[in-house]
Structures are given as structure tokens and as C-alpha cells.
Amino acid sequence: MINAEIIFYSLGIAGFVTIIILSIVLFFKMQAIRQLQNEINQLGENLNALDEQAKLVIRTDMELNRTQDELDKKISSLYTLHSLSQSIASTLDETQIFNRINPDNLSRLGLEKALAFLWNEEKAPQLELNVGYNTKEAALILDYLEKNKNAFFALLHRHKTTSSFDKETSLVPSELKGVFCVDSFIISPILPKQGTGGFLFVGTTSTDNPISEGDKESIDILTNQIAQALDNARLFEVTWHAQQDLETKVNYRTRQLSNALEEIKQISERKTDFVSAVSHELRTPLTSIKGYASILLSGVLGEIPQKIRERLDKVNQHADELVHLVNDLLDIARIESGRAIMKRESQDIRLIIDSIAELLSVQMKKKEIKFAINIKEESVVFVDKQQIKRVFINLIGNAIKFTPDEGRIEVRVKPNQNFVQIDISDTGLGMPKEVQEKIFNEFYRVDNPINEEVKGTGLGLSLVKNIIEAHRGKIWVESELNHGSTFSFTLPRSK
Ligand code: ADP
């Protein structure tokens, strides 16, 4: 009995202990399960976050793709706009400007329809471009424009580009969509600085790809380009007409001048022929006069009284002067008509000057004139020696004539690339500015005391000028009254 009780209690204790142990084990298991549950919850949350992130990534990717597409579209439309602008800017023909906008480049800008018209308050809109409308539709649109003139001109005066999504427009977008048969559109004024302006209308029927704010900017650029091209074309037109006018006038005047020149040439030829003929005619009797005077003076025909001898001397002297004058006249006439033959050869300019200095040394000594030759560099010229000697005789002779006693004459030689310049300076009477051009004319002599006293023909410088020009040279003078003169001329250098 006692054993049974002991066993019973032992079993009870063992059961109790077991229950406690099991409870403890259970407690720990529960703990583990709760932890696992937490971890599972955490994992679930993480999974959700990951899911959200994945969705975000996909959304961003789609967004990026769309932006990329838009960017591609923008780049392509900018490229089209650039080449269209270039093409518009390259023409100077007003009628060609709008032809450059065609369905092809419009579609690359995402547009199907376009109209352009030049329009001012005085006249009806003039259609310059029509893409996407038949004649009837275009006529209806023009009619609508006329009826809503004020609203359109308000845009023009405000320089405002407007579109179907603009709220504050003076036009009614929904009405315009109907009239122009489009779903979205842009109207941009064309504003040249000069002359009639107008509008460019572009639109699309596409609802997937409607016109955007960016398109508005592009069209704004395009209309600016069109306005600039119109200005250029109009300016060119004005300039071209002015140039045509000028050309016509120049041609007319050139014809008049060449006729006058031809006339002058003929007169000059006739004058030369006349001078030659008269000079020849004069030479024969002059030679006879001189001959007879010489015979009488020689005494072959008998002794002549002193008084008659003096008169005959005068006759001889005057005949000499006349022969001189006639010879000069004949030479000028020959050179002017191109009949004189220039025997050109290479000549050392120093030798020519030396020979003339020697020839005129007596006259210079008489007046105690100091004479100097200044040659920078030995120069060989290609000239007719005898003719050039005449040039020096005339110029140095004049310098002696117009220079007072104890004055100074200097000859300077300066070679240049293809020619040699010779200056003959004196410290003589000089001459006023207004006669300096005239002294090269035939028979021109300045009114001065020396000319009153000393005889002359006024042919020397004319002959000199003709000789120099026959050598393709130039001659000019710089002079100051009472201070002296410098005669300068050029001669070709020997090659
Ligand atoms: P001419 O000496 O026979 O008068 P030219 O044709 O040689 O004719 O000269 C024309 C005019 O030019 C001269 O009359 C003179 O008035 C002026 N002239 C020429 N050379 C000089 C000079 N060296 N100084 C001042 N006047 C000059």
C-alpha cells in the first residue's frame, strides 16, 4: 500500500517535472517560432520594398526611354530646322524662300500641314506656301483670315507666336482647329524689317504626337529665319536694280565718252596732219630765205653796206628761230601721231647727263650757276638716246633760263623697280600752282618778266612730254613761285 502510494507520488512528481520541462521546451520553441515569424515578416517587408524599388526602376527606365525618344525627336527636329534655315538663307530670290518648306522636312518636324501668307492691312493675304490643303480648303481658310483680320494683326503687332495650347491668345483655338482641320497648331508672325510681313501656320492631326512647347520655339526660330531671308532678298533686289541702273548709265556714258574720244582723236589727227603739212610748206621757203641771206652776207653778189648786213643778220637769226620752231612742231606732230620711230637701246643715264652738262656748261658758267649730279645707283635705261638728250637740253636749258646768277641746279637719279626717276631742281623763279598743269600744253608760256625779255615758243615742254610718254614714262612738276622748280620724269629701266 505504501509502495503503491510511493509509486503514485513518484509518478505524480515525474509527471509534474516532465510537464515543467515540456513547458520550458515549449516556451523556447515558441520563442524561436516568434523570432522566425518576425524574420519572415521582415523578409516580407524587404520583399515589398524590393518590389517597390523594382517598380521604380522600371518606371524610371520607361521615363528615361521616353525622355531619350523626346531628345532624339528634338535633335532630329533641330537638325531639320538647321538645314531648313540654311536652305532658306541661301536664296536671294523672294519667290524661292517658301518653296524650301516642303512635306518632307515638315514631317521630320512632326508636322503635316503648313500655310504661309504675306499679308498687310492694305491688301488681302497672299498665299505663299500650301502643304496639306486642297484649293477649296485653302480658299476657305483665306476667307476666314480676312474675316478675323483684327485678331491676326493683333498677333502680328505683338510679335507673338501662339499655339493651340496657349490660353491667352486673341484667337479661339478650338475654332482654329476646325478651320485648319488640325488637332494642334502653331501660328507665328513673319516680321521682316522692310516690306510686307505675314504668318506661318503649321499643324498636325495626330493626337498621339501633338505640338509641344519645344515645337513652338522651333517654329519661332524658323519664322525669324524667313523674315531675315525676306529682308536679304528684298535688299538684294533693290541693290541689283540699282546696279543694273548704274550699269546702264555707265554703259551709256562710256559710249558717249568713247564717241567723244574718237572725235577728239580724229580732230587731233587732223590737227597733226595740218601742222605737219604747214610745217613742211614753211620749211622750203625758210630754207630759201636762209640761203639767200647767206649768199648776200657772203659778199658773192657784191659788197653790202653795214646797215643792210645788220638787217640780213637779223633775217638769218629769225629764219633760224623759225626753222627751230617748225622743227619742234614737226617733231611734236610726228610723235603724237606715232609716226616718229624711237630707236631704243640700253643707255647709261650718267653718260647722257654728263654730255648735256658739258654742252650747257658755258651758259651755266656765264651765270655762275652751281651744277650737281646726284646718282644713287648706276642705272641703265632703255631709251632713244637722241630724244632723251633733247629732254635734258630742254629741261636743264629752262632751269638755266629761269635761275638767277649764282643759283643752283641739281640732277638726281633714283632707280625704282621697273623705271628710273630723274628730278631736275633749280633755285629759280618758280611758278604759281594754277599754271603748273598748263605749261605742258603747246605754246603755253607763263606771264613773267623773264619770258617778256627772253624769246621762246612754248613748245619745249610739250615736246619733252611727248618724248617721255612715247617711252611710257610720266612727267610732272613741283614748283613754288620765287623759290624754284623741280621737274621729275620716269624712264624705263633696261632689263
Ligand atoms: P619756252 O621755254 O619756250 O617758253 P617751254 O615749253 O619750255 O617753253 O616752257 C613753257 C613755260 O614753262 C615757260 O615759258 C616758263 O614760263 C615755264 N617754265 C619752264 N621751265 C621752267 C623753270 N625751270 N622755272 C620756271 N618756269 C619754267
Image: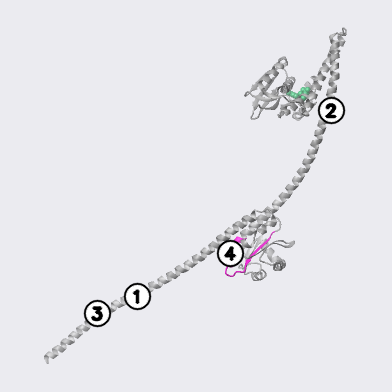
**The CB of the residue at mark 1 lies under 8 Å from ligand 1:** no
| Quarter of the render that holds ligand 1 | top right
Q: Give the Cα distance between marks 1 and 4.
A: 51 Å
Quarter containing the C terminus: top right
Along the polypeptide, which appears first: circle 2 or circle 4?
4
Residue at screen point 43% across, 71% down: 52
> Which of the two discs, 3 and 1, labels the residue nearer the N terminus?
3
Q: Which numbered disc, 1 or 4, marks the residue that appears first in the sequence?
A: 1
Q: Quadrant of residue 254?
A: top right
Query: Residue 251, how many percent across, how many down?
Result: 76, 43
- Residue drawn at the location 49% of the way across and 67% of the way down: 62
Mark 3 or mark 4, which has the lower sequence index? Answer: 3
Give above or below for 217 relative to 367: below
Task: Name the residue tied to disc 2.
Answer: 274
Where disc 4 sits, the SS reads helix
Amino acid type, callout 2:
Phe
Q: What is the distance, in whole Å, between disc 3 and disc 1 at their CAs?
A: 22 Å
Q: Which mark is in front, 3 or 2?
A: 2
Q: For mark 4, does the 10 Å Cα neighbourhood hold few (<14), some (14 to 19), or many (20 or more) residues? A: few
Query: Amino acid under label 1?
Result: Ile
Q: Please rate how many residues cluster around mark 1, counting C-alpha atoms within 10 Å: few if below 14, some from 14 to 19, many from 20.
A: few
- Specify the quadrant of the image occupied by residue 44: bottom left
Identify the residue position indicated by label 3 in the image.
25
* Range of residues picked out in magenta: 197-219
Which numbered disc, 3 or 2, marks the residue that appears first in the sequence? 3
Q: Is residue 440 above or below residue 163?
A: above
The CA span between labels 2 and 4 is 89 Å
